[in-house]
Image (tube, rainbow, N blue to C red):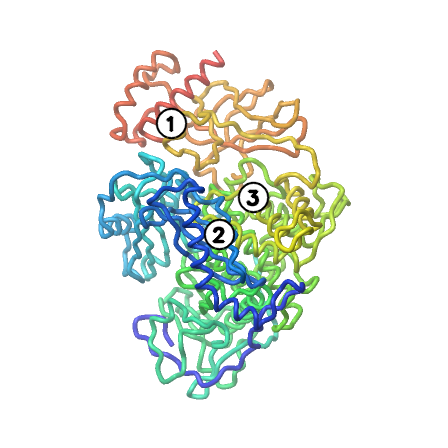
Amino acid sequence: MTFERSRRLPTLVFALALGAATAWAGTSPRFPAPAQIAFHRSQQTLRAGLAQDHLQARRASLGLGSLEGFRTAAVSTNALGEAIVRLDHTFDGHRVLGSQAVARVPLGGAVEASTDAVLKGVALSGQPLLTPATATAIALRHLAPRGPMEATPRVEQVVFPASFLGGPATVTDPVTGKASLDRHRTVHARMASPYVWAFEVRTRLANKVDGRKELTYHIDARTGAILRVVDEVRHQAVPATATGRGQYSGTVEIPSARMADGTYALYDPTRGTQPNPTLQSFTPDESGWSATGLQTWYEQNDAQGNNTWMSYLFQGNATNAWGDGLPFTAYGDEGGPNGQTMGVDAMHGMAWTWDFFQNVLGRAGMDGKGTSVFAQVGCTGTYSRENAAWSNWDQGMALGTGTPGGPGAFTDFDVIAHEMTHGVTGSTVGFLNTAGFEEAGLDEGTSDFFAQMAKAYAAAGDPYASTLPASGADWTIGAGVFNGTPLRWMNKPSLDLRSPDAWYHGIHYLDGHYSSGVLNRALYYLANGAPADASHPAYSPFLPQGMTGIGYEKTARIWYMAVSEILVSGGSGQLTFLHAREAARRAALYLYGEGSTGWGWDSPASRAVENAFGAVNVGLNYGEAPRTQVRFADFRNADWIERHHADSALGGSRQYFPMGERVRPMAQVLNNANTAVTWTVGGRSLFNGAEQMVHKGGVINADGTWTTPTDLGWFALTATSVADPRQSAEGRAFIVNLDADSDLEQDAVDMGALSYSWYLTNALNPAHSVFNAPWVDDGDVATFTDAVLATWWVR
């Protein structure tokens, strides 16, 4: 079966399955039996209606107006037999981005709703001036496809909150590790009011010229401005220096299907009840194939490893014996034994990960609806060869071949399970995975954690088990791909020389694959405990006494409830590691609390959550006094410009200074009488080439002042507490040229030209501006004023 324009499909007679999935069986009397779970699932539609009626009746108490309401976005049944209903907040019938309620509806219909993420004060005037077709045209003009679209764009009118605007985004080259501006990610735009009508335009592009892209645009429906662009494909970041080889699963049993002609295919029709949304465009024929079930495809390349843009299902095998167990080298013959080895690893990982989520956590597929998943291996595109990616649109994965002398094929178990978990979070909490937001680390950390749980489940060897074993995870990611050197260590993330072991102010500047170290280590502690031995790699100076873990089983259930039933993002980017801590604590109280049959008042599990997150500097340990905290101060201090232009994507940690001056950066030290800090140029976010946009420079003087660089642009600074060197903050300083009259002095004479810039607004091209300000509009005036004040403070 080819995955291209001419599509003849294979045939299926019967399947040889690794094992049919079993229903949930919990470890507590509170968990219903399988037959009861089936009944509860049959009541989902009814209970979703009860949840919607409940919230509609509460509109006034929630501070919502007559034009506002709720509509069901998703409904599932958890392991306790309760319906979990996610409801979108609507205004005049249209979805308010990122504003959701989550309702829990048990058998008795007593609705319990969490409305913390429901936005208040939504108000809009007028109606869209653009049509959906015009908004689509604007998106396509920005996308600039050079080949055919894979699908017709999907358009929806929505309400866009100003607080969801993001800052400049980067893309990291997987070979060089260098970062550069990416016009296909977040675009920072201005808005005239806190809420505007917008069109959400989802695009999908996959052709020989452009490669593969899935970009979601938010277009201001009155001005046509692009408010935000987000790349929806979840990529696996890869250091260019890693080397590896080897096929990972060894000799294993994997599900397959026998086709009508008597041959076999790497196709498992026993897992997945709904057709895959991409594969269902093919028409089943006499082969017996359908778009339902786990499937492993390969990308066909020529002998030099160049993509031919044809894909095929692994099929036509007469013996049902697949692969040669060797590292992939057979470009041009991906369907042969050497290429099949990638397919074996992919199918092995998919089947066990599917069973883990279904049998242990009671989830029907990645999207909770039983939608089938497929993997395409042997990918060799620019960002595919040394990468792995999940697509919510496809409900599938693209897995690279690796390169000779570099990483091996991206089909190792934890890579597969990591990517499939993106499908779970994409259909539940909806994390925004974009640099500049802590959510990116929550997204990647969640995928890393459940990859470990699926790995432990597979290691136990029982595909029917409904509980997790007590061990079996190695708490590393990608070691097989890189010949024994992990891509990430979860017990001590800093071993990769990139990831932090604990939270600090400014961590959002990191790519999510590195800021994920905070969540990875917290969940490692929660499951395994933390050592009190300071020489142990997993030792935490924030929890020197150590802690006892609560085990894989409880940790997995707690974090799954947190992401599937408590946390709400909807792509807003507003969630932080503190939100994650609170969600895990609430889940621990609900599942393992004492003093009630629902939300408990306390428990060893909830105290363990507090200690595990406290150990990575996210909140306090149980019963601990307030800690010293360092914050890189925001010079704008939430004035009119700040509030009305939502210029907060960099976390409110920006300061503006003139070039070549001796200035004093600002930092706040909380919970300590000693507010002194030491300053250093640069920051931890600059390790991976971010200096292309953000630099380090200038000189820190003995008195703590900073002689600013004579170059213009963004610079990184780090402040570290003198009283508690464990606590630090990284921020950004923008260096401005105030010398409008070019007399080599930045003085009051320059103010006339600065004031004149107010009237120039967007007519002034920033590329030709002597001021080189970050924004060319009234925000420039605020920037110039800050820099002038910083100069005169010193003089």
Compared to 348, does 523 lie above or below? above
Residue 503 is drawn in which quadrant? top right
Q: Where residue 427 sits in the image (x, y, percent)?
A: 46, 58
Measuring from the top left, give residue 45's x and y in whole percent: 44, 64
Which label lies toward us, 1 or 2? 2
Amino acid type of the residue that numbered disc 2 sits on in the rendered structure: Val
Would you call the spot at circle 2 few (<14 residues within 10 Å), some (14-19), or many (20 or more)? Answer: many
Location of residue 769 with respect to 694 vertically, above or below: above
- Residue designated by label 1: 641
Instruction: Please determine whether, in this image, residue 498 is positioned above or below residue 190.
Output: below
Residue 293 in view? yes
Q: Quadrant of the N terminus?
A: bottom left
Residue at the (40%, 83%) spot, across then down: 288
The CA distance from mark 2 to mark 3 is 20 Å
Question: Residue beneath label 3, please?
Answer: 577
Residue type pointed to by label 3: Phe
- Return the residue at label 2: 102
Name which residue type carries label 1: Ile
How far apart, in angstroms, are the residues tagged by discs 1 and 2? 34 Å
Q: Is residue 518 above or below residue 289?
A: above
- Residue 206 coordinates in the image, percent (x, y): 34, 61
Disc 1 is placed on an element classified as helix
